[in-house]
Image (tube, grey):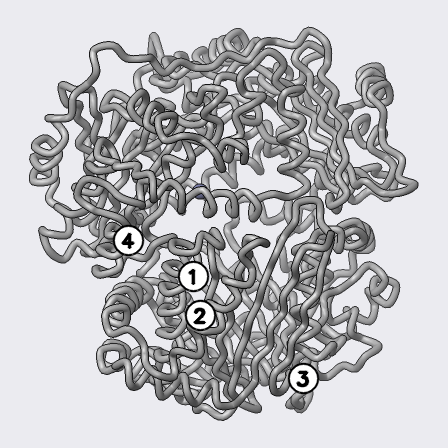
Amino acid sequence: MKMKTFLLAALAMLSTAVVMAQGMMQMPPIPVDPDVRIGKLDNGLTYYIRHNNWPEQRAEFYIAQRVGSIQEDDNQRGLAHFLEHMAFNGSKHFKGNDLLRWCESVGIQFGTDLNAYTSIDQTVYNISNVPVTREGIVDSCLLILYDWADGLLLEQEEIEKERGVIHEEWRLRTSAMSRMLERDLPKLYPGSKYGYRMPIGLMEIIDNFERPFLQAYYEKWYRPDNQAIIVVGDVDVDKVEQKIKALFAPIELPANRAMVTLEPVPDNEQAIIVIDKDKEQPTNIVYLMMKHEAVPDSMKKNLDYLMTDFIKDAAVSMLNDRLKEYAEKPESPFLQASAEDGQYLLSRSVDAFEINIMPKDGQAEAALIAVMTEARRAAEFGFTPTEYQRYKDNYQSALDKMYSNKDKRYNSNFVKKYVNHFIENEPIPSIDFTYETMKQLLPMLPLEAVNMLMKELVPTTDKNLVVLSMHTEKEGAVYPTEEGLKNAIATARAAQIEAYVDNVKNEPLMTVLPQKGSIVNVKKDELFGYDELTLSNGVKVVLKKTDLKKDQVLLRAEGFGGSALYGEKDFANIKMFNDVIESSGLGNFSHTELEKALAGKIASASLNLSTNRMNVSGSSTPKDVETMLQLVHLYFTAINKDQKSYDNLMQTTENALKNRSLRPEVVFSDSIQATVGCHNKRFTSLVADDLAQVSYDRILEMAKEQTANAGAFTFTIIGNYDEEAIRPLVEQYLGSLPAEMEYVKTGDVSTEFKGLVTNNFRHKSETPKALAVMTWYANDLPYTLENNIKAAIIGQILDMEYTKKIREEASAAYTVFSMADMERDDFKSQASIFIYCPMKPEKADTAIIIMRDEVNALVKGCDADKLTKVKEYMLKNHSDEQKQNNYWVNCINEWRRWGVDLNTDYEKVVNAQTPETIAAFAKELLNAGNCAEIIMLPAE
Ligand SMILES: [Zn+2]
């Protein structure tokens, strides 16, 4: 618990450096961004308003409350979260579910745009992506925030309906991990309320509490002095400020009120060791946590806070690189380990430096020794100048990237920062301030400060040490003991250690540039505004310049090929292909060396094998396009076999797979796959037994085949690249790719169920679960813009119907997922509907009937009012999507593949839809008669 002292020590060091450089006497404050209007009403309510016009005509409306489940009394456990749900079920100006209905009418979707969360110390509600096209919409959103702040009705009848919904949310979220954490919290927080305040609460309280308990929480804690209104977007700041004042000032602040205080967490003199197991936990995990005091909110105001944050991130990040490298050693007792520093589990009053470890089987103690020893090595010898230089290079690039896109920041970025400012006093400087300050400070922040902080993070005694070890409960399994874990720590502390040696390859990614090709033809596409280049080796390149994101260039390529070329003996290789290639090295570099060599670059590329195509994807900043293209070139010409990295991948995969079917959700999803895909082994999930069939050499051979003929590929490059530079780069790195072979078109290897298929079964799980999937498809509907839109509408309509009928009326589920779409490949086009519902077991029959009935009802038409709402949402969404590079890549690809323009007439076609056109489409889809139902119910 020495954060303060070590902060001060590290800061003294930093200050010396800064004082010497700038002659400053003390740390200056971090100025609040002048572009946000912050105010406080007399009743204590805080507001943040900011104008931001990317995208245009959109805004976010938030209310943040600095209270959560920690404020609950023992007989209120779960009511902070229950209250959050009640905010959508009746308030002064929005009776019943009117709030949802109004939001839908302007294209704000429940769950996506309209949502809330309750955590241990905050409850935050949001109305997002609001189309602020008229003043009335701004007014209504403020009125909703007002109702949430002070106007909830909490009606008995609505409470009764919501009990079931929350019970199902609990069921849905319950997993081995959450069961163990719930059980272990009292031991992890001895003598603290944090041991008993998981936000989901106790189901016996959720099912039975009486209304006054909920009212009491609402009245006691939802008060203006605990609330902040946040509005960011394309709004008039002065006007919104006036409206907030008029609306919220009359809310009274009670004279006698309970204060929100930070719940303390007592120190532990002896190590806390908790070992737990669960029958559905698929892998073993050990958490090593070293608690220390959190930076108090009052100490976050000055520049030293930003600097400390930087040095802490530097230390953690460099340690993580070492742990990653260590994991690839054959003798490593752990498969993966990663460090972080932040909140200790749930409590904001205490932080922890923690390392999460995935040990090899039966090696929990050895893994703990190894990881603790690495932490000690970093603490006692510090990091090397080369490691620190890489970190600083990466930091500088990330800073430049962020700054370059400063005019195209989304509203949601700002809102999150303001919530943190209100609740945790996190600083909110302007982007210019952060950029200029960090750029100046970066060369002055000494490695010694990072090393000093690292030393403080790893204490030499057991005080405030916590080890949480979670395991798969299985017959014959051997679990670590408290004694064993304690000894592991002691052993690590006594071990003789030496300083880390940083092995770096000091050479460029490509030492010899390949023989350059040339552009032999250029064709313009007027519709989508791109250039299609043909290179001398036959490669096609589509170039579209955009400045939608100033810091982004995307590359997507597809070539003929694909996994359909390979038969049954390669099924396991097909399934591991992407991961194995990703874990390999490139050129002269091993996987680890490559990561080091890319320090300071923001560029990536990968190969992805799909059934009938070989795909390549990449992304970079405009500055690092050349690096991205070099990576792509190397994937085509020089994948470097890295046995160590491969072995680690295979062991990690085996560890993840061997117990996967202990999870009921996995049993269910495997059943879906088997039923829908007719047990075709090509498409079933990889299982542990398959791994024996995987061959690294064979996968490398397959990669060679798939990339042998670049002439079969079209590369689409989109984003804010430099117009002058891109063509020579493309000639250099793509024009030089090999194009020797004829390309092979693959055949149709898909298998699909026909007619009506059902798979109903029972499955025993720790927490009884009932899950249902229904899916319909038809193959003879043409792939057109119209049919794409009709399918999407059906998905949206079903979503609305199910929310209303299954969640709100029947309380039979917390959520229902439904979607419908059109897809096309070389052989067919397909329209399909897919519905997934995790149900209350006692109400499964009801839910299943509604799921079926609503789909069948579509052939008679859909509700005109709902259709209007869906159209609003789709039009708004479409205009937002047009601001994303990914959207245009997809449109261009569909246009080039099938000659279908999914963009130009979108609005017109959406507007033209009627209940009759939707009914006609639904009828065609359902008349194909292909329907599969997969239902899993709990076994006794
Ligand atoms: Zn909830």
In the image: residue 407, left or right of residue 667: left
Percent from the top left, x then y, of residue 676? 64, 76
**From the viewer's perspective, is residue 552 above or below residue 94?**
below
Looking at mark 1, is its residue's CB closer than 8 Å to ligand 1?
no
Instruction: Give the farthest residue toward the right.
Output: 476
Q: CA distance from mark 4 to mark 2?
A: 41 Å
Name the residue type under label 3.
Thr
**Which residue carries the number 2 mark?**
717
Quarter where residue 657 is shown:
bottom right
1 and 2 marks in contact (CB < 8 Å): yes
Mark 3 or 4: in front is 4
Which mark is first along the chain, 1 or 3?
1
1 and 4 marks in contact (CB < 8 Å): no
**Which residue carries the number 1 mark?**
553
Which disc, if any, is residue 100? 4
2 and 3 marks in contact (CB < 8 Å): no
Percent from the top left, x then y, of residue 892? 40, 78
4 and 2 marks in contact (CB < 8 Å): no
Percent from the top left, x then y, of residue 64? 31, 32
**Which residue carries the number 3 mark?**
751
In the image: residue 102, left or right of residue 790: left
Name the residue type under label 4.
Leu
Residue at 43% in and 56% down: 810
Which mark is first along the chain, 2 or 1?
1
Which disc, if any, is residue 465? none
Density class for disc 1 (Cα within 10 Å; few <14, some 14-19, many ≥20) is: many
Mark 4 or 2: in front is 4
Which mark is first along the chain, 2 or 4?
4
In the image: residue 642, left or right of residue 187: right
